[in-house]
Amino acid sequence: AQKVTQAQTEISVVEKEDVTLDCVYETRDTTYYLFWYKQPPSGELVFLIRRNSFDEQNEISGRYSWNFQKSTSSFNFTITASQVVDSAVYFCALSEVGGGADGLTFGKGTHLIIQP
Amino acid sequence: GAGVSQSPSNKVTEKGKDVELRCDPISGHTALYWYRQSLGQGLEFLIYFQGNSAPDKSGLPSDRFSAERTGGSVSTLTIQRTQQEDSAVYLCASSLFPPRGAGEQFFGPGTRLTVL
């Protein structure tokens, strides 16, 4: 069965520090998609990125970057030069193409606190 | 354009009462999903609709839960004889493409249900 683990329940850093949020997944499927979502205090989940299992290229979008490594089943998310507005709960999620549920399988989330 | 909307935003009810939660997906999105977010369980997938059909209802927590979708648009999640453990935020999402693939899901703001 599919599973997503976000071992860091809460991280607190000072503004401008770099921070990495870890995500480890388990799946028996060879074709799958990984996602990151942000949930700010307002509560609405905001899509950040999608990565398919055949594309291990790292991706950078502004201050955000993602490191996908199939060898370690990880899909980590790094925020460079963090800002207070980055404070939120971040969720990693998995979608299997061949099996599993029709919905996304989410990790428990990492609560990121950026202190000014 | 308009995003996913949900109503009510907050619902307080007494144990044993029935409640209806409504979701309006993004126009043109054929896939619609319900999730539940609670402190203990994190984000759980409940049910998925493709058009008006839900292929698999096994994710619903109990037979007190039911969902329907009409006209390929609005969906209603009904909880009968509510229990305190039903207290959670119920999130709705929609996507342009079917699940198990690349299509990202767009989430609504959720309905916070409190059962007294």
Image (cartoon, coloured by chain):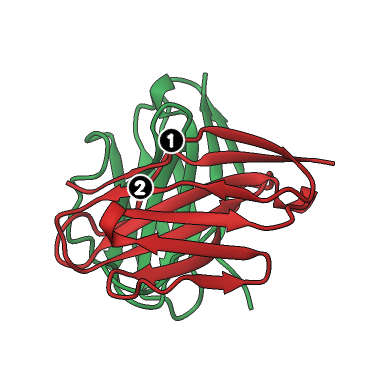
Vertical side of B10 occupied by A73: above or below: below
Q: Disc 2 designates what residue?
A: A24
Q: Which of B59 and A59 is in front in this view?
A: A59
Image coords of residue B9 (percent x, y): 61, 45
Instruction: Tell me which residue sits at (56%, 64%) in the image.
Output: A65
Q: Crowding near pointer 1: few (<14 within 10 Å), some, many (20+)? A: some
Instruction: Tell me which residue sits at (41%, 74%) in the image.
Output: A57
Vertical side of B10 occupied by B71: above or below: below
Chain letter, red in picture: A
Chain letter, green in picture: B
Q: Disc 1 designates what residue?
A: A7
Q: Is mark 1 on a helix, strand or loop?
A: loop
Counting residues from the N terminus, which is met first, the one under dot 1 or under dot 2? 1
Instruction: Tell me which residue sits at (68%, 47%) in the image.
Output: A42
- Relative side of B111 to A2, left or right: right
Residue flagged by tag 2: what amino acid is it? Answer: Val
CA distance for labels 1 and 2: 8 Å
- Residue B78 sits in quarter: top left
Vertical side of A37 occupied by B96: above or below: below
Residue A45 visible in image = no
